[in-house]
Each structure stands twice: as structure tokens, then as C-alpha cells.
Amino acid sequence: HGVRVEVFIFVSCIMDDSAPAPRVNGELLGNFIGKKVLLVGEVTPVDGVKATLKTGDDKMITVNLSGDGSFASKFVEFEGSVDSADTITESSRAEFGNDFDMYTYNELTKQISGKSRDLFY
């Protein structure tokens, strides 16, 4: 009689943690699908598991929350994996208060990802 061997292959989609998370705005988000990013915006809770984030370039992004859906401040930075051009899944967050200059932050984000990229990465 022969020997029966069963092989199970486990495939996992794990976010790439090998490099620092780039700071992105809504327009750039689609370039980072499957990657970890930092995204800042004005947060609006939707329910306990989702929130909407208005970025500095006026894009509306859905955030799948990992924690509770309550926020103590208006502006929040999410670190998370990009699911699509308009959706991320949160891994952590930092609250930036109620008075944050989104215009200047968006300009910085464009510099970081544009002509000044080599200064940051």
C-alpha cells in the first residue's frame, strides 16, 4: 500500500510593513493598494465599524475601523492598509485635535510624494 500525503497551503494577504508608511492624500491613495499608508483628514463617524474621512484634497475616503467608532477630535491620522482607491482599513490612529491646517498638510503631502521625495525616503 502507498503512503498518502496531504499538503495544505496557507496563503495570507499581509500588509507590507518593511518600509515606513508614506503620507498620502486622497488622490494618491489608489497608488498604494495593498500597502500601509498614513492618511489625515476630517473624520465623520458612520457607525461603530466605519468612518468617513475628508482629506486635504477634498476626497471622501471610507475607513474600516479596528477600534471603536468614537473620536475626541475633528482631525485624525489613520495608519492602515489601502483596500481600494477610496477605502482603507485602520491599524492605528492619532487624533490631531480640532484646529489642524489641512491645506498646508496637503501641500506637504504633495512635496513628499513629488519632487522632494528623496528627502523623505
Image: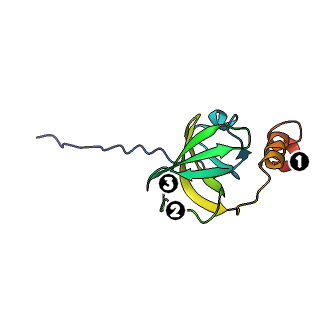
Q: How is the image coloured?
A: rainbow
Residue 38 position, x and y percent, is 67, 50
Q: Amino acid at mark 1?
A: Leu
Front disc: 1 or 3: 3
Work out whether mark 2 precedes mark 3 in sequence or the reverse, and give the earlier one.
3
Which residue carries the number 1 mark? 119
Residue 25 position, x and y percent, is 71, 41
Q: Quadrant of residue 57?
A: top right
Which residue carries the number 2 mark? 70
Q: CA distance from mark 2 to mark 3?
A: 10 Å
Front disc: 2 or 3: 2
Q: How many residues crowd mark 3 within 10 Å: few (<14), some (14–19), many (20+)?
A: many
Q: How many residues crowd mark 2 within 10 Å: few (<14), some (14–19), many (20+)?
A: some
Instruction: Look at the image and tell me in which quarter the N terminus lies.
Output: top left
Q: Are marks 1 and 2 in contact (CB under 8 Å)?
A: no
Q: Is residue 60 left or right of residue 69?
A: right
Measuring 59% from the left and 34% from the top, which residue is drawn there? 85
Front disc: 1 or 2: 2
Work out whether mark 1 precedes mark 3 in sequence or the reverse, and give the earlier one.
3
* Tag 2 secondary structure: loop
Residue 32's disc number: none
Which residue carries the number 3 mark? 65
Measuring 88% from the left and 48% from the top, which residue is drawn there? 119
Q: Quadrant of residue 27?
A: top right
Note whether 69 is above or below 107 in the view shown.
Answer: below
Report the front residue among 11 and 34. Answer: 34
Report the front residue among 50 and 87. Answer: 50
Q: Amino acid at mark 3?
A: Leu
Work out whether mark 1 precedes mark 2 in sequence or the reverse, and give the earlier one.
2
Q: Residue furthest bottom?
A: 72
